[in-house]
Amino acid sequence: MEQTNIPHVLFLPFPVQGHIRPMMKLAELLNQAGSQVTFINTDHNHNRLMSNADLKTSSFHDRSPKFLFRSIPVENAPSLLNIKELLDTLQIVARPAFRQLLISIISDQCRPTCIIADGIMSFVAIDVAEELGIPVITFRTISASCTWTYFHLSKLVETGDAPIPDGNLDKSITCIPGYENVLRSRDLPGFCRVEKPENSFLKFFMRETSAMTRASALILNTVHEIEAPVISRLNSIFTKIYTIGPVHALYKSRISQSDSSNGAGLWKEDRSCMTWLNCQPLRSVIYVSFGSLVCLTRDQVLEFWHGLVNSGKPFLWVVRPDLIVGESGIDPMELEMVTKERGFIVSWAPQEEVLAHPAVGGFLTHSGWNSTLESINAGVPMICWPELADQQVNSRCVSEVWKIGFDMKDTCDRSTVEKLVRDLMDSNKREEIMKSTDEFARLAADSVKEGGSSYTNLEKLIKDIRSMSP
Ligand code: UDP
């Protein structure tokens, strides 16, 4: 291939759904704006993405400039049980595989202008990029609030707050500027709870967060107006920050349906729930999803299920095939049989569309950042039940800082679930929460309009990448 002055951007996401999806949306936006894109997946995820009918039939192959998929050979499994295994494998094989791939791309006369690397793939990308003289921009797919918290992990270790000692989850955390009156131990990232000093996740996130600073700029999938104070704190670390969220809304406003990858999901969506939603009254349904990685025990599933049924509200629940761990004894189909009157169960939903549906009035979520932003964008208030990584910080911000939902972290007994669903769906507490929820939806919508902060930042990013081209 001939070397041209068309920018060539190489994307390297961490290989799980919540990272691939926002990075893919940005990749398509840059492609539409005239950059060639190479999007790198692991073999395993590449095959899953390609088996998605939308990707196969979309116009990817005919695009100009080109949008190419490449993959590196990393065997992995998608469930939480294997995240550690995935990380261990990645740490051994991903860097040499990535280096080899990059060298072959360069020798094809197609040297990347820059690499947009996931904020937790620095261990794969940064050394290799520096060796080969290619600039790196880091894309952290979590909130600015949580990114800032991660930048204080070493401080938390120094003060003895992490790993959390003695299971004291109610201690106030005072060493993170701006969050002194917000965070308790229980609101720290999930991996801080493992008490062992050799906590490998904690060490991994400390290393990766520090390595991010070797990148020339930071991209965040957030709305400037929602996280302005903490973004200005992050400016003390990164002089260039592009906030481009909600990137799915920016994508929707700029990419036509016929040209879109329709979400680039690793699971096949079951659209039957849309027909069911069409038959439900306005704002009556509580949507329940724990994202792509969180798992529940049989007892937790039963508590959620009883709470939902007892609330009397119709619910739509995503029960992934690998959601329930341990000795299960629950067949999701059985749950559905006894739920039919009031609930609907799918294995994977078209979530953005579900949240935008007028029948949906609330979201019981694990507080993954994509889900949180999608809910904010759709103006749907949340009940949060976080389990992993950034989710604990997000849920605290949702309830205590932004006041767009309730945080029920660390408990899911049926009476709490029932009460919070009722409070969220039809009490005067809902009215209060809806004021800020509506305001946040407006901020998100304005940010992706022409002249809005995310729209303008995307334009700046496009221009800055062009200026890196030879
Ligand atoms: N998602 C979806 N259908 C589902 C459940 C989730 O499309 O049934 C999408 C959701 O819209 C979001 C992503 O999967 O974009 C999950 O990302 P998030 O950061 O919320 O959580 P994670 O899966 O990383 O824990």
Image: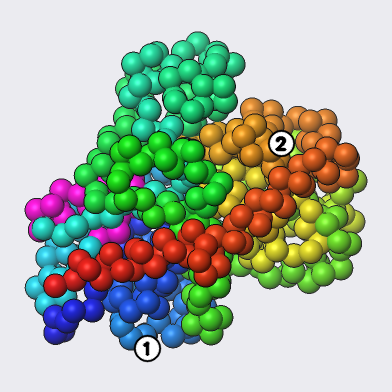
Residue 118 is one of the magenta-drawn residues:
yes
User: Residue 317 vs residue 264: left or right?
Assistant: right
Q: Nearer the viewer, residue 407 or 453?
A: 453
Q: Residue at x 66, y 35 (%)?
A: 399
Q: Which residues are magenta?
A: 115-132
Q: Locate the C terminus by quadrant.
A: bottom left
Q: Quadrant of residue 61?
A: bottom left
Q: Earlier in the sequence, mark 2 or mark 1?
A: 1
Q: Quadrant of residue 423?
A: top right
Q: Residue at x 78, y 71 (%)?
A: 275
Q: Residues within 10 Å of mark 2 (few under 14, many from 20)?
A: many
* Residue 151 horizontal/vertical position (percent): 36, 33
* Residue 335 horizontal/vertical position (percent): 77, 50
Identify residue type, mark 2: Phe
Q: Which residue is mark 1?
A: 62
* Magenta segment main secondary structure: helix
Q: Which residue is mark 2?
A: 406
Identify residue type, mark 1: Asp
Judging from the image, the colouring scheme is rainbow
